[in-house]
Image (cartoon, grey):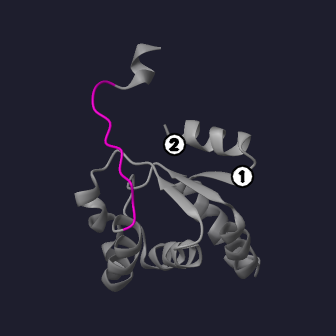
Amino acid sequence: LASALGHHACLCGYKVRYYNVMKLFEDLTMARIESRLPKLFERLSQFDLLILDDFGIKKLSAEQVLDLMEIIEDRHGSKSTIFASQLPVANWFETLDSNASAADAILDRVINTATRFTLKGDSLRRKH
C-alpha cells in the first residue's frame, strides 16, 4: 500500500523517497562518519513524501531515535511521511524507548496527525 501511494505521488509530480528503515540508518551512520549528516537531513526534508518501510523491526539506539526525531521535526507540518510497519502502533514506543523524551516527541508528531490504515488478513506475498 505504501509503495502504491508513493508510485501514485510520483505520477502526480511529487518528489518521493522510499527507505527501508534499517538502510536509512545505515545511510545516516555513513553520513555522520563522512561529515555530511546535515546535508542528508536537508535532502530528506525536501521530499514531498518520505516512505519509511519496515519500521519497528529492530529497537533503535538512542542515536537513531535522535536522528529520526531530526527527520520528523524537519518534515512535521509541511511534508508527508508514511511509516509502514507490521508492529501495532501501540508497540511503537518500545522501538524508540532508548530515548524516552525523543520517543514521546516523535510519536506525538506522527500519531496525532496521522491517517492510519490497518490491514488484516494473509500477506499477499504468500499468495504469489
Judging depth in this view, the residue of 78 and 1 nearest the camera is 78
Q: Nearer the viewer, mark 1 or mark 2?
A: 1
Amino acid tagged 2 = Ala
Residue occupying the point 51% across, 42% down:
2
Is residue 10 or residue 99 the one in the foreground? 10
- The answer to whether the residue labelled 1 contacts the one labelled 2, judged by CB atoms less than 8 Å apart, is no
Q: Which label number is shown at residue 14? A: 1
Q: Which residues are magenta?
A: 113-122
Residue lying at 57% horizontally and 36% vertically, measured from the top left: 4
Q: Looking at this view, name the residue that lies furthest to the left.
A: 90
> Residue 29 falls in which quadrant of the image?
bottom right
27 w.r.t. 33: above or below? above
Q: Secondary structure at mark 1?
A: loop
Q: Residue at x 60, y 60 (%)?
A: 24
42 part of magenta stretch: no
Task: List the residue tagged with mark 2.
Answer: 2
State yes or no: residue 119 in magenta: yes
How many numbered discs, if any? 2
Report whether 113 appears left or right of 87.
right
Q: Earlier in the sequence, mark 1 or mark 2?
A: 2
The three-letter amino acid code for the residue at tag 1 is Tyr
Label 1 CA crowd tier, 10 Å (few <14, some 14–19, many 20+)? some
